[in-house]
Image: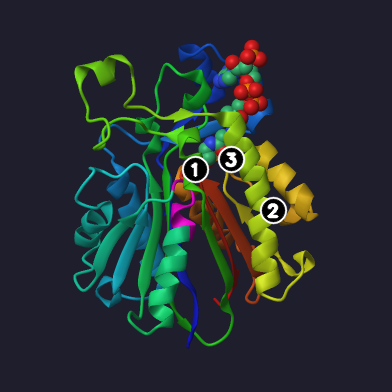
Amino acid sequence: MLNVGIIGVGSYVPEKRVTNFDMEKILDTSDEWIRTRTGIKERRFASSEQATSDLATIAAERAIKDAGISPEDIGLIIVGTNSPDTLYPATACRVQARIGAKNAAAFDLQAGCTGWIYATTVGAQFIRTGMYKYVLTIGAEVITRMMDKTDRYTYVLFGDGAGAAVLGNIEDGGFLSYELYADGSLAQHLVLPAGGSRMPLSQEVLDKRLQYTTMDGREVFKFSVREISRLSKNVINKAGLTANDIDWFIPHQANLRIIDAGMKRLGIPKEKVVVTIDKYGNSSAATVPVALDEIYRAGKIKKGDKILMVSFGAGMTSGAFIVEWSK
Ligand code: UT7
């Protein structure tokens, strides 16, 4: 078994900024409520011409460039998304064509906001077994299109974005431990009810606005705080480390209060926790790879640093891994 690591990263967020003050103009909400309850100050919205594969393609091209490989070297592309361009074909296939990865298999993986952690964990196994040399994993969303503009409870929380990683064999370090989890009995807490085989689109569906996301925020909140700390502890133990050994924590960016509560349970100091929610809101499966790319581009990660990434979301799902930086 060979070591597997992240050999390239890239991200893209759309240019359009939507501030809390912009939200005040269209909804019965306030900058104060959004900031104090969630930590969000602004988020990015894709332009009307952009769909998820457009964002994913830019992030992917940046990650491939960073890895110093050619698109033709890639054996597999996995896109973690909850807002695919179309229900089928997979967004990953659209990305495959756009970047010219003509030797790659491609599929989407849907695991709520945990999508990129799931995709990367799955992708790493293909390299570990020797089936593929390079795997491209992407977390990409134009998730704001799945939200109801008239629902202040959900519309203020989300933003669009994409982050990507190229996985490959490395000499030292790389992934030290992984953990994936799901509890489908909690599925009703975060759902996009219509547009699938259970409830196809119809005029009645549109009148009831069931083509948009519904969420029980408090239940998701409880699950998330518990899962951030539980999964982080599990991957730390599996890797034979202690919390002190971790140099960077990159949690899913859904709510600053969830991040703070989770990190407090783990006893993690604020300086080690990467926070981007103030700028980007919750971009679902994209939050973790976008945050990783930001600290990487800022030159904050050193070779040998141990980075713990953890996420949770619809399903309900959760997942975490630790990677020892090898670049
Ligand atoms: O990636 C996973 C996806 N989702 C999440 O992780 C979300 C997890 N949950 C949360 O982040 C929080 O539960 C929310 C931010 C969604 C809500 O915060 P909360 O502190 O749990 O608020 P709440 O549901 O207890 O609502 C408090 C009040 C309510 O008014 P009343 O009933 O006290 O009069 C809401 O109607 O806040 C009201 N409210 C708002 N007020 C202004 C809800 N949304 C808004 C809003 N602006 N946008």
Look at the image and name its color scheme.
Answer: rainbow
Which numbered dot is residue 277? 3
Type of amino acid under label 3: Ile
Q: State the CA–CA distance, disc 3 to disc 1.
A: 28 Å
Residue range in magenta is 112-117
SS type, badge 1:
helix
- Does ligand 1 reach within 8 Å of label 1's beta carbon? no
Q: Which of label 2 and label 1 is nearer to you? A: 1
Mark 3: give few (<14), some (14-19) or many (20+) Cα within 10 Å: many
Whichever of labels 3 and 1 marks the residue nearer the N terminus, that label is 1
**Residue beneath the point at 44% across and 81% down:** 128
Q: State the CA–CA distance, disc 3 to disc 2.
A: 19 Å
Q: State the CA–CA distance, disc 2 to disc 1.
A: 21 Å
Extreme residue toward the front, this view: 185
Horizontal side of 318 relative to 115 (left or right) equals right
| Closer to the camera in the image, 105 or 215 | 215
- Please identify the quarter of the rendering in which residue 320 is found: bottom right
Look at the image and say whether residue 114 sits in the magenta stretch.
Answer: yes
In the picture of the structure, the residue carrying the numbered disc 2 is: 229
Which numbered dot is residue 236? none
Q: Is residue 288 visible?
A: yes
